Image (cartoon, rainbow, N blue to C red):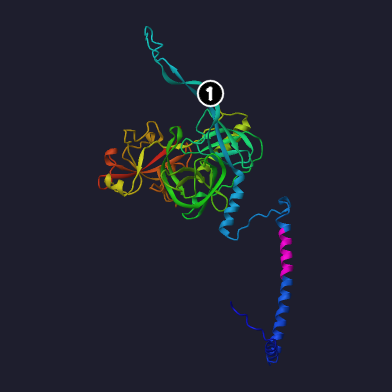
Amino acid sequence: MYDIPEFNFNKFKKSIFEILSHKFMPIIILVVVVAVAIFLQQEKVFKNKNNNLFLNIENSVLQPLSQKSAEKYVSKIEYEQAIIDSVASASPSVVSIVISKNVPVYEQQFINPFGSIPGFNSPFDFQIPQNVQKGTKYQEVGAGSGFIVSEDGLVLTNKHVVSDKIADYTVFTNDGKKYKAKVLARDPVLDLAIIKIQDTGNFPSIKLGNSDGIQIGQGAIAIGNALGEFRNTVSVGIISGLGRTISASGGGGFSEVLEDVIQTDAAINQGNSGGPLLNLRGEVIGINTATAQGAQTIGFTIPINVAKRDIDQIIEKSRSQSDRGSSTESGQIKIQYPFLGVRYVVIDDIVKQKYNLSVDYGALVLKGDNGEAAVTKDSSADKAGIKEKDIILEINPSTGSGQAGKKITKDNSLAKIIRDYNPNDKVTLKVLRPANNASGIVDADGDWKEINVDVILGERS
């Protein structure tokens, strides 16, 4: 067992007296007293702060949410705030378009395929399954997007969104209101259409921008009814390409070639068709139209400046019909397009080399791969004497007045230039014609000759 050491009180007392007698002891005691005083003061401040903190938490968190002031988020980043402002400005004008119609309802039945054949008697009960229509059912069959371009309810969208002529169309605005809509016009050339909201209300019209001045790399915002379910979905990207030519196809056998479209990486999902593509000022610069299959964030939009032609025509004609109290038999308004009537290929270095041409620009008039005529019979071009293998170099070439002609190039196609005119307009074509196309027309080398041909543009049917 261990022994506990004996405690010597006198020795302990002597040691304490020696410590207190030390010359630095008063200083040490003073420091200790000051430290204790500071500690007590800080504890008091800390308690006050905690009391205020808990009071603030109780007032801000525990009070009813309805009593809290709702402050809008304001970004300190200029680019981000521009997106927020653009979406807030444009969203009230963006609509969802729902397509509804009667669709057949089928029921599977078992029938004898030979039962209706006279004299055919079988000892066996031969039955096969077959779908038999049992009436129809009215239901939603599709959805798209659009945007309001006039206060009286004109809505611009894609033609493929409203291509079904026997369907009914319903417009849902951003505030959840529902309106019946009627198709006023389907563009005969481009994937554009205009529908009219069947109501006399005053609708918010979106701001239209200028698509001619856009640049690759500038910001872009797409809004639409994504997947036909998520209304006014917003996606952000940039302009990633200009002047694209694509072949677009959709349901119901809809297919067409779209020229001079804008490429963007702002996500365009199914259901976004017909919605606007905005710049960072909240102005429409394009109409969302197509996406590249097998790729991510490659979408295409029709420039708004092209669509302005349709909008102007519809507004003018609808007002004219309203003033006369009349309308077309079908209730639709015809969008007019000029028509020249030639089939052609735009000349570049490859075409120049293939056909051994002397120029690297222009439109070479050629028949189609399946034998389609190079010049449409009785068209404006036919009446003006345009022939196969002619090369149309310019539209309205310069005559010394200082105004340059419109040269036909890969980036400025013949169809694009002709769209700037109206039916019955007179234009002059600068044509390079081979010697074997017309007797006596040869150049100094005996091969080609430049001539000017006057044409009165027709109307595309």
Side of 143 where 393 appears, left or right: left
Q: Which residues are magenta?
A: 46-57
Q: Residue 178, percent across and down?
A: 63, 36
* Main secondary-structure element of the magenta-colored stretch: helix
- Choose between 422 and 71: the one closer to the eye: 71
Q: Locate residue 354: give its quadrant.
A: top left
What is the three-letter code of the residue carrying label 1? Thr
Q: Is 260 rendered above or below residue 377?
A: below
Q: How many marks?
A: 1
| Position of the N terminus by quadrant | bottom right
Question: Where residue 139 sits in the image (x, y, percent)?
Answer: 55, 29
Residue behind mark 1: 136
- Where the C terminus falls, by quadrant? top left
Residue 460 can be seen, yes or no: no
| Residue 52 drawn in magenta | yes
- Give the answer, above or below, for where 76 lies relative to 359: below
- Of 350 and 417, which appears nearest the observer? 350
Examine the rendered structure and indicate whether residue 254 appears above or below residue 450: above
In the depicted view, which residue is nearer to us: 86 or 444? 86
What is the secondary structure assignment of the residue under circle 1?
A: strand
Q: Is residue 28 visible?
A: yes
Taking the view exactly as shown, the residue that stands out farthest to the front is: 1
